[in-house]
Image (cartoon, grey):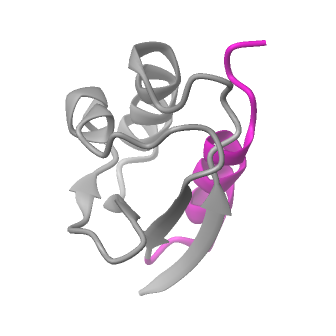
Amino acid sequence: MAHATVAVGSSIGLHARPANIIAEVVQAAGVPVTLSVVGGEPVDAGSALMIMTLGATQGTAVVVTSDDQVVLDKVAELVAADLDA
């Protein structure tokens, strides 16, 4: 599986709004994607609730993993973006 490590860009971390945006993109893509903090257990990126369990704050390094490079790149871009702006 391919992976990318990106820093969380949202000013208050991966809370409900950013998590929901990411989960919707993953669900629409229909391919497995996981997120994890470095050294932590991966969670299903298609679930906003699971994303919020990461406790990732702004600047936290998050590993995005998927077999689909296009979806991986899109999710990595969303994690790195300030989705609160």
Identify the residue at horizontal 65%, vertical 62% (top origin): 6
Q: Position of residue 40 (x, y in %)?
A: 27, 69
Image: 85 above or below 31: above
Image: 2 above or below 10: below
Q: Is residue 14 left or right of residue 43?
A: right
Which quadrant does the N terminus fall into? Answer: bottom left
Q: Position of residue 68 (x, y in %)?
A: 51, 71
Image: 32 above or below 81: below
Residue 71 position by quadrant: bottom right
Identify the residue at horizontal 46%, vertical 46% (top origin): 29
Q: Is residue 60 left or right of residue 47?
A: right
Which quadrant does the C terminus fall into? Answer: top right
Identify the residue at horizontal 43%, vertical 28% (top origin): 19
Q: Is residue 72 left or right of residue 10?
A: left
Q: Is residue 43 left or right of residue 68?
A: left
Identify the residue at horizontal 66%, vertical 40% (top origin): 78
Residue 81 position by quadrant: top right
Q: Which residues are magenta?
A: 67-85
Q: Position of residue 30 (x, y in %)?
A: 35, 48
50 or 56, which lies in front?
A: 56
39 or 84, which lies in front?
A: 39
Q: Main secondary structure of the magenta part?
A: helix
State yes or no: residue 34 in magenta: no
